[in-house]
Amino acid sequence: MSRGRCARPAILVKRDPPLYIQAMTDAPLIPASPSEDDYVRQVTEATPPPLLPEGDPIHLFEEWLAEAGKGEPNDYNAMALSTVDADGLPDSRMVLLKSVDACGFVFYTNTQSAKGVELGGQPKAALLFHWKSLRRQVRVRGVVEPVTEAEADAYFASRARHSQLGAWASDQSRPLPDRLALERRVAEMALKFGLGKVPRPPHWSGYRVVPQVIEFWRDRPFRLHERLVYDRVGDGWETKRLFP
């Protein structure tokens, strides 16, 4: 827990013995690094996996995504999306992957949101998938392009009606005076469209991250992790392995 601006850990504040003693007895906020015995037990219990294959990265990603779908408790298609603003300051948030193929990784959002504005100014992005239960990560870096109108229409039509209304009601990333203001907007949109079809808002669409680099990361004992990188070269891929 934070104790003020740039506060040092409580265990170093020796001028306050009660605070020092309490900190020593509380459960640590950050877990300790695994011990030698912890790692040895992991090695003993685990079957060494084969090296990651150097084939089609999209096919490998789809295999990992399918495995994550069987083990992750929720939102196994969640990914961190990183962009930069006009000052070059990085910005990250979690979004949901909605489709993937040889052309790239697709997500949808309000194009007037912070991410939409940032992508409009600098159409490049990084993605990070972290599947904790599998001890795996996938990093993607590439250029960003809008999906087609047909793609955006088709996906928007597949959403639940209340989600469609929410897309109209929310001025995403803008100040919200209070929660009731959003609920009123949703109610207004419900009255506006009645029982009819809810069209896709003109400011709501999708983006495709066209990968230039894809890295697969797999946990191994003693922090000797496996890293396999695919670099796009023309219409194909070149691979290399990295030190962990």
Image (cartoon, rainbow, N blue to C red):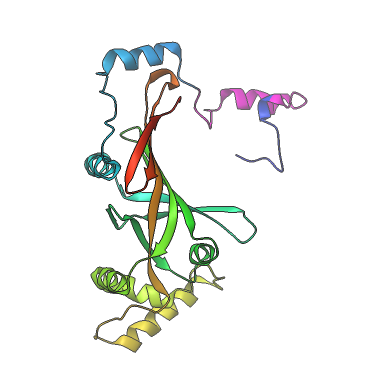
Left or right of residue 31: residue 168: left
- How many marks do you count on the picture? 0
Q: Report the quarter where the N terminus lies.
A: top right
Q: State the residue lying farthest toward the right.
A: 15
Q: Nearer the viewer, residue 236 or 184?
A: 236
Q: Compared with residue 221, is residue 109 higher up or lower down, i.e. above or below?
A: below
Where residue 27 appears, as percent x and y from the top left, is 52, 28
The image quadrant that residue 183 belongs to is bottom left
Q: Compared with residue 112, is residue 105 higher up or lower down, i.e. above or below?
A: above
Residue sitting at 37 percent across and 83 percent down?
189
Left or right of residue 120: residue 235: left
The image quadrant that residue 227 belongs to is top left
Q: Nearer the viewer, residue 36 or 10?
A: 36
Q: Does the magenta-highlighted stretch encompass residue 152?
A: no
Residue sitting at 44 percent across and 22 percent down?
223
Residue sitting at 27 percent across and 68 percent down?
155
Q: Compared with residue 200, is residue 58 higher up or lower down, i.e. above or below?
A: above
Q: Does the magenta-highlighted stretch encompass residue 18?
A: yes
Q: Report the quarter where the C terminus lies.
A: top left
Left or right of residue 120: residue 41: left
Residue 189 in view in this figure:
yes
Residue sitting at 26 percent across and 70 percent down?
160
Residue 129 in view in this figure:
no
Left or right of residue 217: residue 154: left
Where residue 108 appears, as percent x and y from the top left, is 37, 64
Part of the protein shown in magenta: 12-32
Where residue 118 appears, as percent x and y from the top left, is 53, 63
Where residue 76 appears, as percent x and y from the top left, is 30, 47
Q: Nearer the viewer, residue 138 or 131?
A: 138
Q: State the residue lying farthest toward the front.
A: 234
Q: Compared with residue 68, is residue 122 higher up or lower down, i.e. above or below?
A: below
